[in-house]
Image (tube, rainbow, N blue to C red):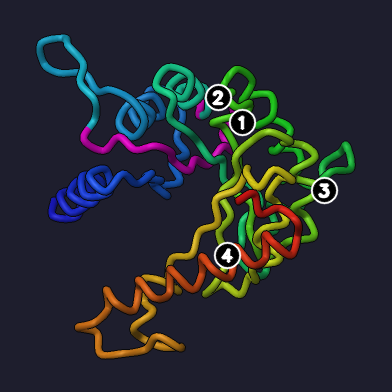
Amino acid sequence: MWGIWAFEETIKYARSAGLQVITDAKRGDGGDTAQAYADGHLGEVPLFDGARSASPLRVDALTVHAWIGTSCVAPFVKAVKKYGTGVFIVDKTSFVPNSEIEQTITSAGDHNWEMLANLVQAWGEGTEGRYGYRNFGVVMGATYPEDAPKMRKILPNSWMLVPGYGAQGGGSDGAVTVINEDGFGGIVSSSRAVIAAWWKGPFKRDPVYFVEAAALAAEASRDDLNAALKRAGKLNW
């Protein structure tokens, strides 16, 4: 109970600060359960009198496991189109070594992650926003920059969530490989390296100052990524 309360309060605070909120919940069920997850995380939930209300857990985007297929994904696609929220399908993850399932070769000669990316390309039709980018994309790990161009070729105008930068060993140059030439199309995530910056590394300090350490780590990450974008000729400001 207290965990849900803390989550709701975190969402409220982020909203008050004008931040975009992504829930890394990795939902992956099908049917009615998938519909409930889509309603709860991205849309509206039913009330007892038949009315509907915005969910207190509603965020801007959600990570989803899609190996069940369309039975799982369809409710999320519907929510994205109706509410303008977003989904990142967990596809090419950042873990080292990488998933055996993702790396399995299909009968067509592609990797499973490439097959899934092609499904995402089909599922995401009609989720384009004002500037042509889709609200339906994938997770593309920063620890595998050699695969980023392949992913971008399959999904030329999808937003991608890029974990693995920082604590998992992904560098800034690899992290920005997935970014389009216009400087958009990717959201680089750094969790432990920021949240636990007080614990070890260049920002280590007494845990009572964890907020200061996190702020410094976030600023350093921002500057590092902007420098990588500049080196790649993708910095658009």
Q: Earlier in the sequence, mark 1 or mark 3?
A: 3
Whether residue 78 can be seen here? yes
Place residue 16 in its image quadrant: top left
Residue 143 horizontal/vertical position (percent): 67, 66
Question: Which is more toward the observer, 14 or 33?
Answer: 14
Question: Which is more toward the observer, 231 or 25?
Answer: 231
Magenta stretch, residue numbers = 56-72
Q: Which residue is mark 2?
A: 129
Left or right of 90? Residue 85 is left
Q: Secondary structure at mark 1?
A: loop
Q: Which mark is residue 133?
A: 1
Query: Is 63 contained in the magenta span?
Result: yes
Left or right of 171? Residue 14 is left
Q: Which mark is residue 122?
A: none
Residue 200 horizontal/vertical position (percent): 41, 88
Q: Which residue is mark 4?
A: 164
Q: Amino acid at mark 3?
A: Ile
Q: Amino acid at mark 1?
A: Tyr
Whether residue 98 can be seen here? no
State the CA–CA distance, disc 1 to disc 4.
23 Å
Left or right of 141? Residue 17 is left
Question: Which is more toward the observer, 108 or 38?
Answer: 38
Taking the view exactly as shown, the residue that stands out farthest to the front is 237
Q: Earlier in the sequence, mark 4 or mark 2?
A: 2
Q: Earlier in the sequence, mark 4 or mark 3?
A: 3
